[in-house]
Amino acid sequence: MHQKKTLTLIKGLTFLVMMTLLIIFLFPVGMSIYFKTQEKAYELFINKLEQAATIYVNNNTDDFDGLKEVNGFIYISLDELVKANLLTPPVINPLTKDSVPLNTIIKITQLSDNKYEVELFYGQGL
């Protein structure tokens, strides 16, 4: 009877050690996957904003004197993109899970014909 309890204790300790080792090795892998997923979600979010801004400019090029020459630039807000039905409010930052203020500013610089650089001002809610 005493020997059976000892074997059960050894099995229990072995199980705990194995589980601890498993957790120690798998936790960093899981965190890495989580952070990569968050990073990818944020990249997709930024790409969506850049695409919306580019479409907005292409649809309204004649309205912007600042984009009539190379290196010319304009500023627009997220609110303008929402009003143009290019974004649906609320605009949520996937990293912070917070709503991005619609007065967030985007700078668009013309690089060449129909090629633009879109610069988001991260201090404005991004």
Image (cartoon, rainbow, N blue to C red):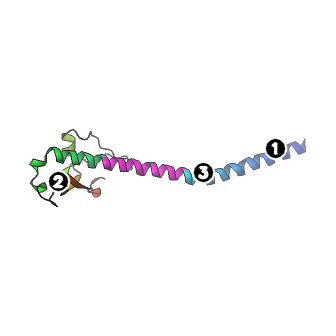
Mark closer to the observer (1, 3): 3
For marks 2 and 3, give the CA distance: 50 Å
Q: Which residue appears at 67% of the width and 51% of the height? A: 20
The quadrant of the rendering that contains the N terminus is top right
For marks 1 and 3, give the CA distance: 27 Å
Identified by mark 2, the residue type is Asp
Which numbered disc covers residue 8?
A: 1
Asked if the stretch drawn in magenta spans residue 126, the answer is: no
Q: Which residue is mark 3?
A: 26
Magenta stretch, main secondary structure, is helix
* Residues packed near mark 1 inside 10 Å, few (<14), some (14 to 19) or many (20 plus): few
* Residues packed near mark 2 inside 10 Å, few (<14), some (14 to 19) or many (20 plus): few
Q: Secondary structure at mark 1?
A: helix
Identified by mark 3, the residue type is Leu
Give the image location of residue 98, x and y in percent: 34, 47
Identified by mark 1, the residue type is Thr
Would you identify the image quadrant in which residue 117 lies?
A: bottom left
Q: Which residue appears at 85% of the width and 43% of the height? A: 5
Q: Secondary structure at mark 3?
A: helix
Q: Which residue appears at 50% of the width and 50% of the height? A: 33
> Looking at the image, is mark 1 or mark 2 earlier in the sequence?
1
Which numbered disc covers residue 113?
A: 2
What span is colored magenta in the figure? 30-47
